[in-house]
């Protein structure tokens, strides 16, 4: 019986090994592969694969059947970070404490590494072993991942985020941006785990709502972490992240209000897991991890 920490480490190792092996064996230009691997192995938390494996665990399924979709969602997440860091977007020099992809490989190669990760993600799902996963399930997974990442999901969220800059947004508007920009890509792994486990519609409904609440909580904690290190002696947030023009949960509700909202979303996410009646240990631990993470 694995502890949550062991489960997390195992999950990261499985996706890191699989993604490394898959990209290394591609018949593609070496520089492109190097650039893809540079960002894939840049030390992310691997929360999306973890959610997929934890959902399979909840249904007592072998986590092996989820390795390809777990790698696919992590590849698309990585592409989004590479493109988000580009000079035409956020223009960041550092990601996870390391130089961003375009700083190392140049803007042209960074765009192409992102493009390659996005398209390869769908290829690796389509090439899953059909003895383990039927073509019908592969199509369902590809469809759900396209919806999460595409013009109704993450890309829409990124556009809404750009358009919302320098505007004062309401709580509902902010939530709508994050639902699409971050939320849907956090919901995909849970939906994928449920699809691979032949979940009932009742299970799927609870799991979808769990993942939605968790996604919002994840973003609130991200906003808190942007300022928590920059709080002055009387608890007032200071620092560059909150001086810019962007609306955040902390700007709308203050650090204390945002923390209360975070705990409310975490508690509601947990209630959906408990209501499911599935094996809940890992999914509940993920809620605690998201609620308490400090990186
Ligand atoms: C370029 C189409 C396109 C989309 C970019 C995800 C995204 C959309 C931008 C990233 C910028 C950002 C800080 C978004 C908030 C969501 C978030 C906290 C993303 C980082 O995800 P983590 O914490 O990253 O899972 P790691 O480094 O752990 O993989």
Image: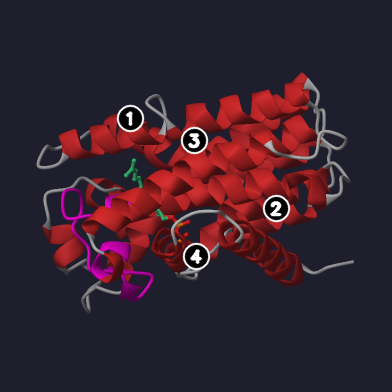
- Cα separation, mark 1 vs mark 2, equals 30 Å
Question: Disc 3 marks which residue?
Answer: 184
In depth, the one of 234 and 67 nearer the eye is 67
Q: Residue at x 31, y 59 (%)?
A: 255
Is residue 250 inside the magenta stretch?
no
Q: Which residue is mark 4?
A: 44
Instruction: State which quarter of the image contains the C terminus.
Output: bottom left
| Colour scheme | secondary structure
Q: Secondary structure at mark 3?
A: helix
For the point 83% across and 40% down, the residue is 278
* Quarter of the figure with the N terminus: bottom right
Left or right, 279 with reference to 182: right
Spatial CA distance of label 4 from label 1 is 23 Å
The disc placed on residue 156 is 1
Q: Position of residue 71 (x, y in %)?
A: 61, 51
Please name the residue shown 16% across and 55% down the image: 87
| Residue at disc 2, secondary structure | helix
**Residue at the spot 44% in from the left edge and 58% down from the top edge:** 29
Please report whichever mark, 3 or 2, sits nearer to the chain's N-terminal start.
3
Of discs 4 and 3, which sits in the foreground?
A: 4
Chain part drawn in magenta: 83-103
Is residue 260 visible from the viewing direction of this image?
A: no
Q: Secondary structure at mark 1?
A: helix
Residue 189, how many percent across, how many down?
63, 42
Q: Is residue 37 above or below residue 124?
A: below
């Amino acid at each position: 019986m694995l502890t949550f920490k062991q489960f997390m480490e195992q999950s990261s190792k499985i996706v890191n090994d699989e993604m490394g092996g898959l990209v290394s064996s591609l018949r593609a230009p070496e520089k492109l592969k190097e650039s893809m691997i540079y960002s894939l192995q840049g030390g992310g938390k691997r929360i999306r694969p973890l959610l997929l494996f934890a959902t399979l665990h909840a249904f007592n399924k072998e986590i092996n059947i989820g390795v390809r979709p777990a790698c696919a969602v992590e590849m698309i997440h990585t592409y989004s970070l590479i493109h988000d860091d580009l000079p035409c977007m956020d223009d960041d020099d550092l990601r996870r404490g390391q130089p961003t992809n375009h700083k190392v490989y140049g803007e042209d190669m960074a765009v192409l590494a992102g493009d390659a990760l996005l398209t390869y993600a769908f290829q690796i799902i389509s090439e899953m072993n059909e003895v383990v996963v039927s073509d019908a399930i592969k199509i369902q997974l590809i469809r759900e991942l396209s919806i999460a990442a595409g013009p109704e999901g993450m890309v829409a969220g990124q556009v809404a985020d750009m358009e919302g800059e320098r505007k004062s947004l309401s709580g509902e508007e902010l939530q709508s941006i994050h639902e699409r920009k971050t939320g849907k890509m956090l919901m995909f792994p849970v939906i994928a785990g449920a699809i691979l486990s032949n979940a009932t519609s009742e299970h799927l409904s609870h799991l979808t709502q769990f993942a939605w609440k968790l996604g919002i909580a994840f973003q609130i904690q991200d906003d808190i972490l942007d300022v928590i290190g920059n709080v002055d002696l009387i608890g007032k947030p200071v620092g560059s992240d909150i001086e810019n023009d962007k609306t955040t949960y902390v700007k709308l509700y203050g650090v204390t209000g945002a923390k209360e909202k975070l705990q409310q979303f975490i508690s509601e996410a947990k209630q959906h897991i408990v209501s499911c009646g599935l094996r809940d240990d890992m999914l509940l631990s993920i809620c605690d991890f998201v609620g308490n993470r400090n990186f």
